[in-house]
Amino acid sequence: MKHPLIIETIDLFPKLDTELISLLRSLSKEDWERQTLAPLWKVKDVAAHLLDGNIRAISMFRDHYVGVNAGKIDSYRQLVSFLNNINADWVNAMQRVSPELIILLLEITGPLYNDIWSKLDPKGKAVFSVAWAGEEESENWFHIAREYTEKWHHQQQIRYAVGKTEPLYQREFYYPYLDTSMRALPHHYRETIAVENECIKFTITGEGGGTWYLVRKNDKWNLSYDFEHQPACTVVIDGEIAWRLFTRGISKMEAEKAIQISGKHQLGRQIFYMLAVMA
């Protein structure tokens, strides 16, 4: 089997920022107030959240300043609750800030934020693990790739809300998002029982899509880019809904219309509940 490699995303951050600033500058006053797939956030709120991500990372990684201490976190649910609370605090405070100022601050902080990741050893131990992939300890490259998925999907939430989903579906931007998100598969399937060497094939359609294989070996699931035998189950996901599926931006009923499962359905249907975000 061909096992997944390091996902290199550092060079994509400035390009993603360029697309974001161009998008935000094109928005009308009405666009800034449109509802996004995030139930509590409009377009302006999501843009403010992206700014928060920049400022928090610069403060922590460059200036070694934490600010809000999480205290003792004993569970995944406690961590999600803490993150939700500080995210909400920031978005609420940003209600008094204009869209024009948010754009300016994103332009200022973007390069400072991007510079942080270029200075880290990709194989070094990350300050934060990728919890949605089940990791208690992660390498920097995975933490950085996770940051990329945050930047990608929040910008796409804005684009989806205003009807401007391109160009983030292009392979340069979308495949790294998907490849990172699919690293959640072994953890997500950890309680799903299968026989030795049984395989689930996942294909995401479209220019930015690809194929991944989840293989049962030694009583655990392993992710691979190939598999030499017939899969027990094949799952085909429409590329335009994959990111929504992994970020809780689509209902199960909607997802069922855009996902085709053949073979052992009980294996494939677990994909409806996978998340690649802290939620």
Image: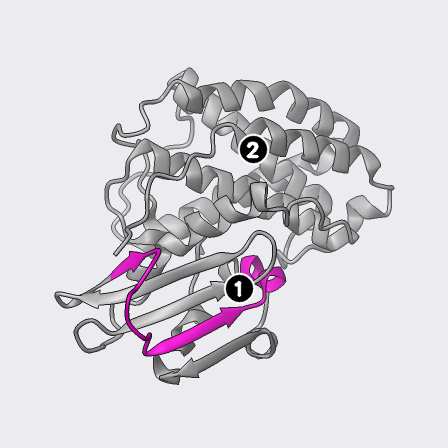
Q: For the C terminus, which image quadrant?
A: bottom left
Q: Is residue 239 magenta?
A: yes
Which of discs 1 and 2 lies nearer the camera? The answer is: 1
- Neighbourhood count class around disc 1 (C-alpha, 10 Å): few under 14, some 14–19, many 20 upward: many
**Image height of 156 relative to 252, above or below:** above
Which residue is denoted by mark 2 in the rendering?
52
Q: CA distance from mark 1 to mark 2?
A: 24 Å
**Image height of 151 relative to 215, above or below:** above
Asked whether 28 or 18 is in front, the reply is 18
Q: Residue at x 70, y 47 (%)?
A: 158
Q: Residue at x 79, y 44 (%)?
A: 32
Q: Which amino acid, mark 1?
A: Leu
The x, y position of residue 3, in whole percent, is: 28, 51
Looking at the rendering, the stretch of residues picked out in magenta corresponds to 222-244
In the rendered structure, are the residues bearing label 1 and label 2 in contact, judged by CB atoms less than 8 Å apart?
no
Colour theme: one colour
Q: Can residue 278 be seen in this snapshot? A: no
Left/right placement of residue 96 relative to residue 30 reads left
- Neighbourhood count class around disc 2 (C-alpha, 10 Å): few under 14, some 14–19, many 20 upward: some
Q: Residue at x 86, y 42 (%)?
A: 29
The x, y position of residue 178, in whole percent, is: 48, 52
Q: Can residue 218 be seen in this snapshot? A: yes
Residue 100 sits in quarter? top right
Circle 1: element type:
helix
Which residue is denoted by mark 1 in the rendering?
245
Q: Which amino acid, mark 2?
A: Asp
Q: Residue at x 67, y 35 (%)?
A: 94
